Image: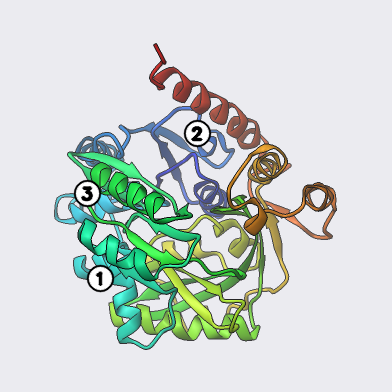
Amino acid sequence: MEVIILDGHLKSALAATRSLGKKGVRVICASERTSAMSLHSNYCAQRFVYPSPSKDKDAFVDAIIELAKNIGEKPLVYSFSDETFLPLARQREKINEYVTFIASQDESIDIAFDKIKTLSLAKKLNIPYVESYMVGSIADVENVAKGLSYPAVVKQVSSCIWKDNDGVKGTAEYVFDKDELLKKVTAIHTNTGKWPLVQKFIQGGEFGVEMLCKDGEIVAVSSHKRIRSLNPSGGAAVVKETICGTDIAKTMEREAAKLLKELRWEGPAMIEFKQDERDGVLKLMEINGRFWGSLPLAIFAGVDFPYLYYKLARGDLNIDETKKIVCKTNVRSRHLLGDLHNLLIVLFKESPVRNILYPKRVEAVKEFFTPHTGQRYDVLNQDDVTPFFMEIIDGIKKKYNSFQNKPQKK
């Protein structure tokens, strides 16, 4: 069975490309741009460029179908972002004739990819979660603001929301008073057509548990703690470390298993938690119902999720044997360019949350240059070096295009 790797610009897609290619699987690497790093890996057998699903999700789905027709024998599709996963999942009846695509039932996907529905399920299952407020009008926001402490967090209910076939991506944003809250909530509602989620801000460590499921049964698992993010205020983890076998990992596994069993989940998922430093309780943040950004770490730690997913799709996954796989603990991986991005933000960006979330500049510089024995790199690899340089080129091109498309002041 051949495979199609989507989101070729992401480090998780590159990790899957390398994992499968090394095992002799023929990998077709796909992305919305030719400079995507996975397309230039030694383990990429064929390149494909598709229309941006954020700009035209229907054209994207049609392009994947045409690619699959040319390949034949229903290739297995891997997705690494909401932007590619959701359009395919929502048109599964259309695509299933041409591709192999593992996904849960529509209702389960809706719950997993909607933060409000996820937290409602957590409440039903008695899983602690970050205190959150659901709003459906400006009057609701006014009421929430009366008892809200600041800073507070405002999030889109889904990381990517399509409005008139255009995808609107969003990240967590901080507000420091009622006026900011009203302004931010209104802007998100206007841009997406959906009311956002308002959450209480809590400080503490961030953790994740990664799982592969078959009808809600966990067949493989790993867990990690976040050390640094792309931005000190949030974003993808750029330095992370496995914590498999620890008390925190066991707690996350237990709570995540409740969620995924209830959803009868099929395929990969990563569940994020935050440990509230006030009471030490792990609190659910969200579910990522597809392959996740820290995938390279799990592979380094001995849990090769991409290959296990491949075996699951082929029907030759021995679940009893899979459960014996041991995730190595204290394995650390680093996304070098992402970590550099973090350092530059710490050194030079002015932010209202600097005193709350940013480390001291001297400490950040020291930690950036401190070597860690056995540390692995998500992208940089001496046996497959071209993707590292293509990531730099791709980043420059993306910045340039963003600048070119930015409205000019008169």
Q: Measuring 41% from the left and 22% from the top, which residue is drawn there?
A: 406
Q: Give, as a three-letter code, the residue at label 3.
A: Tyr
* C-alpha separation, residue under disc 1 versus residue under disc 3: 23 Å
For label 1, the residue is 108
Q: Is residue 66 left or right of residue 242?
A: left
Q: Mark 2 or 1 closer to N-term?
A: 2
Residue 36, labelled with which disc?
2
Residue 376 quadrant:
bottom right
Work out whether mark 3 precedes mark 2 in sequence or the reverse, and give the earlier one.
2
* Mark whose residue sits in front, 3 or 2: 2
Alpha carbon separation for disc pair 3 and 2: 25 Å
> Residue 79, can we see it?
no
Give how far across and how far down residue 142 sits, in percent. Answer: 28, 61
Query: How is the protein colored in the picture?
Result: rainbow
Numbered mark located on residue 98 in the image: 3
Residue 202 on image: x %, y %: 53, 69
Label 3 CA crowd tier, 10 Å (few <14, some 14–19, many 20+): many
Give left or right: position of 22 versus 107. Answer: right
For the C terminus, the quadrant is top left
Image-quadrant location for residue 290: bottom left
Residue 171 visible in this rendered orientation of the protein: yes
Q: Are marks 2 and 1 in contact (CB under 8 Å)?
A: no
